[in-house]
Amino acid sequence: MLNVSIVIPAWNESERIADCLLNTIRQTVMPHEIIVVDNRSTDDTCKVVEQFILDHPEAPIKLLHQDAEQGLIPTRNYGLDHATGDVLGRFDADCMIKPDWVEVVSGIFTEDPTAMGATGPVMYYDMPSRHFGLKSDNSIRKRIYRADGGQPLLFGSNMALRASAWREISGEVCRDKADVMHEDIDISLHLIGKGLKTVYSPRMIAGMSARRMDTSFSSFLNYMRRFRNTFDAHPQHWRKHKPEILFTAMYPAMHLFYPVWQKVLNTADINPAEAAWINEQMELAEKEGRELYDETPTDETYDEKHEERN
């Protein structure tokens, strides 16, 4: 199986970064490395990460600093350039990956040597009906989040690249100094433009916050325009569907409901990020506990072996 590095760009994410890191180490397969790249945070992001590293010395977590330039793209690139794994996973600092994410990602690239980029669905962990939302997101991304007649577009909150593929396009990805594009779609189109295969897997699951819906309508529309801007920057590529139309239609209801649900969570003292995959994590812990118990000799067996040695 191929090993997987995880790259997490971070800017002022002290509220969620510890939960995010906890999800990266509660995995069926431990990542090769977990790289947090801080980009001039003015809050306690670095302190939280440093404390997490002290509290989990067994975890392969590194904190890097990208201070040369403000922005997601140079921070993302810095992390991907410094990663040493066979596969480079990448998601945001408020994302919570499913406990088998690393294992699934490794399997995707191991089983399909032609796969160069992979992505999957997400659930909004800080909204109700999370699993219903996951099914809906899977349906949307599987059917309409595509380019050039069917190539899957990678989603920045849940994506992975073969390290060799990143090295092939790293010098060509758009810098987007004006900050008007979707950097994940840009990566996708650079891969597709070189004939490098992208794949979609419903088993590659992550959770993300719906906080984007809590912005003003004008801000949300500007964010949706990034779809068109990105394709305008790549006129040789085309798309049949425009997911931004659907996302914009969803905005009014989610914008109204998001703050209401946050009050519900706060009143109930529930950390939605912590609870995102709690059932799956408990099952994993119970399985590891049973395996440990089965591997531990009984008192009788221990006594017999001890007497034989004497």
Image (cartoon, grey):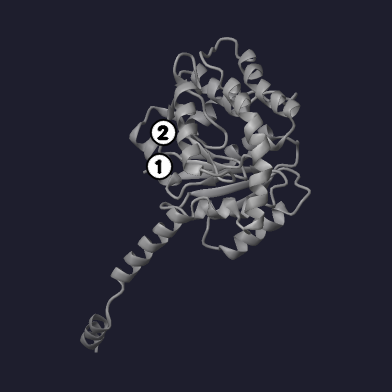
Q: Quadrant of residue 202?
A: top left
Name the residue carrying label 1. Answer: 104
The quarter of the image holding the N terminus is: top left
Left or right of 280, for residue 257: right
Q: Secondary structure at mark 2?
A: loop
Front residue of 30 and 261: 261
Callout 2 environment at 10 Å: few (<14), some (14 to 19), or many (20+)?
Answer: some
Amino acid type, residue under disc 1 in the picture: Val
Left or right of 45, for residue 185: left
Task: Give the foreground label among 1 and 2.
Answer: 2
Left or right of 274, for residue 104: left
Amino acid type, residue under disc 2 in the picture: Ser
Front residue of 280 and 186: 280
Q: Earlier in the sequence, mark 1 or mark 2?
A: 1
Q: Position of residue 303 (x, y in %)?
A: 25, 86
Front residue of 72 and 213: 213
Q: Position of residue 249 (x, y in %)?
A: 61, 24
Q: Secondary structure at mark 1?
A: helix
Vertical comparison of 142 with 7: above or below: above
Instruction: Verify CB contact (< 8 Å) between mark 1 and mark 2.
Output: yes
